[in-house]
Image (spheres, helix red, strand yellow):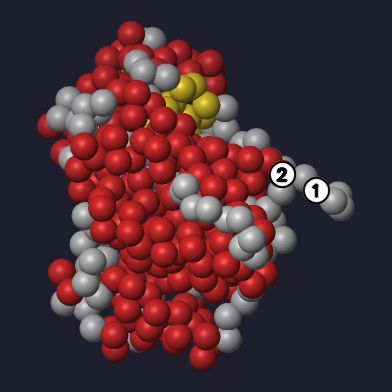
Amino acid sequence: MGCTSYKILAPVTFGAGATAETGNVCVSLGSKKVLVVTEKALVNLGLVKKVTDSLEKAGLEYQIFDECVQDTPDYVVEAGGKAAKAMGADTIVGVGGGSSLDTAKAVSVLVGSGMTIEELLIPGPPKDNPKLITVMVPTTSGTGSESTQIGVVNDTTRKCKTGVGCIPSAAIVDPELTVGLPRSITVYTGLDAFSHAIEVLCSGGMDNPHSDALAYDAIERIIKWLPVAVEDINNLEARENLAIASNFAGVAFADAIVNLGHGMAHAMGTLFHIPHGVACAWSTPVVLEFMAPVCGEKYRRVAHTMGIDTTGKTGEECAKLCAAWQREFMKKLGVPDAQSYNLTKEDFVSCTDYMMNVEVMTMLGKRVPTREEVVALLEDAYEGCKSI
Ligand SMILES: [Fe+2]
């Protein structure tokens, strides 16, 4: 093994009831005025109150911005920035799923750096921008955004997704916030985290022993506990394991960036508004098959976890068996198929330009596809999910 390095970004406070620590964490970081960036549904469910109760108890001034919606549109980020400036916020606390956390990150950078929204969306390599104090409180177990250095923002003018660099100051991962999450969201977010871990293992040159260990652990927990959480949405032990898995996969891809599957998923999200976790679930089997010749051995252990007999099999064969297993997993979990969204094979193939020309992640795996290979991958993805 050659020289390697790995990052540990934001400190994480983990455990059932950890939300009550939000105020103390903010105070320890020097917060005075907090803008809570979240979505209306979470206010109505009472989840945001758990956060604001903690802020109040710690003597912090706060306001709530609850306009976050799916896919983190730039105009919501801009509105959040105005709200933060108007109250003189020094801290952003993001509460929600991936879209809300990414909105919170982008708002924090927008205000902390003094950039305009146009400047914020200029594509470039991710870097840690100046920001306000940024605390992430995820309410789903999927995105891992609380522990990654990027928030993905939807540029509604150029119709593409842009990564805004923002390393959170701290994260609060409280599995209690995910108890009772509807079955469909549990599946989508769980398979998003699963795709992160699978893609970490085939990340081009950025994987390392730390990211591998976290990815394997995340995969094991998801395989064991996602079906349990889907069966019983109130099972706290399952929620704890999925919260750890999601966070570990996020920490892992802070180094070993997600790649081909997310190139495909972002194309489908941008062009057809397919929920991110569904698009990730569709893309994972083709990632495993495409990467099989170059890093199949890494998937031998995943195959073991899946209960596959790998005796006498090559690594490449193991990866392909993992792909077949994942397609069955999707079926068991009730992932919607392409037909449910009225998508045709041509629609899938129409993602080629976006994957080749816009989404740099497509090219960040251990094996880089040609245009012809991207077309073939999209056709294979369609065949695998046209009717589940
Ligand atoms: Fe993802």
Amino acid type assigned to the residue bearing label 2 in the image: Pro
Residue 32 vertical placement versus 369 (above, below): above
Residue 257 vertical placement versus 65 (above, below): below
Q: Mark 2 vs mark 1: give the one in front.
A: 2
Residue 10 vertical placement versus 309 (above, below): above
Image location (x, y in percent) of residue 86: 32, 38
Residue 181: quarter of image: top left
Give the total of numbered labels: 2
Image location (x, y in percent) of residue 289: 52, 71
Amino acid type assigned to the residue bearing label 1 in the image: Thr
Image location (x, y in percent) of residue 118: 44, 65
Identify the residue at image location x=69%, y=56%: 206
Badge 1 marks a residue whose secondary structure is loop
Query: Counting residues from the N terminus, which is met first, the one under dot 2 or under dot 1?
Result: 1
Q: Which residue is mark 1?
A: 4
Question: Relative to 173, is 373 on the left or the right?
Answer: right
CB within 8 Å, label 2 to label 1: yes
Which of the labelled discs sits on residue 209, or is there none?
2
Q: Relative to the observer, which residue lies in front, 98 or 132? A: 98
Quarter of the rendering occupied by the C terminus: bottom left
